[in-house]
Image (spheres, rainbow, N blue to C red):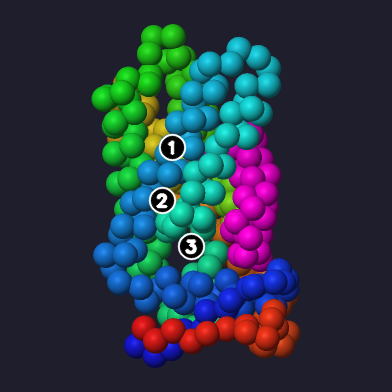
Amino acid sequence: MGQILVVRMEKMDLLGNDLLQYASHKGEAKAVEPLYKTAILGFLAGVYISLGYLLYFKVMSSITTDLNALIGALFFPIGLLLIVVAGGELFTGNILELSLGFYLKVISFKDMVKNWLVVLIFNAIGAMLTAFCAGSVMHFVTNQNRDVLEHMVLSKIDASPLEMIVSGIFCNVLVTLAIWLADSSQSHISKMVLIWPPVAAFVFLGFQHSVANVFLLTMGMNSGLNSLWEMLFNLFFVVVGNLVGGALVVGGMYAMAYKADSVHVTTTDDVAEVINQ
């Protein structure tokens, strides 16, 4: 299957072209990993993001203050943190790393799209299963907090297609920037600190994230607040926005900015190792 460069960051953080090379090779590694591994990690990522959203919903339902949205947003990033540190394949994050691999010609367009589709499908399965367990088995939605869920659901499905796309763009600009920042550091503590602000920002601002919406709108369906068609209609436009934000705005701009620089990664004396696939 050839050889894939895996950068080892032991002391120094990565910036500029070094970070571009590292992120693109992560995308390359993801593009050729076995299907079962992609499916498992995709499912787990869907669960993790859903748990973050469930925590956000619980905070929004429990705190009666004008700051509840901000406080809830500060809890949501636990989902992406689990994905980055514990392991997971998230559609919106893979948009960045796989697109960079494509721009730098280390993966094909076919392999990029295949990974996105598989990851999105299994993200959705994980999110829907978590929503079913939370709503129908554990009864997180009650008569007391149903209005909170209704407000969240309507804020997603009542938007126009253009609003969904633009919201999806801004959402994944922030999410992929969180991934970009996390890729720059080896320290788990640093990753946590770097991930938290952009993810909390997109939640607080109400931007639309495709996988999080699967969880929310499945919860909504379980409570009779929206239909399957309304969920699919929303997801189509939000996915388009997420793709534009991650692959064109962040991925495309950084690829253009740093691609012409030196292709050598210089972090430590023991910079990289080659792993046979």
Q: How crowded is mark 2: few (under 14 residues within 10 Å), some or many (20 or more)?
A: many
Q: Mark 3 points at which residue?
A: 94
Q: Return the residue at label 2.
A: 45
* SS assignment at label 2: helix
Q: Residue 51 carries which label?
A: 1
Hey, what amino acid is under mark 3? Asn
Which amino acid does the dot numbered 2 rest on?
Ala
Q: What element carries label 1?
A: helix
Q: Residue 209 at x, y = what percent? A: 51, 44
x and y, in percent, of residue 79 in the image: 49, 44
| Quadrant of the drawing holding the C terminus | bottom left
State the predominant SS element of the stretch in magenta.
Answer: helix
Q: CA–CA distance between discs 1 and 2?
A: 10 Å
Magenta-tinted stretch:
179-208
In the rendered image, residue 166 lying in the magenta stretch gets the answer no
Q: Is mark 3 on a helix, strand or loop?
A: helix
Q: Which residue occupies 61% across, 12% down? A: 64
Q: Which amino acid does label 1 sit on?
A: Leu
Quadrant holding the N terminus:
bottom left
Residue 108 visible within the image: yes
Is residue 261 left or right of 168 when viewed as pictured? right
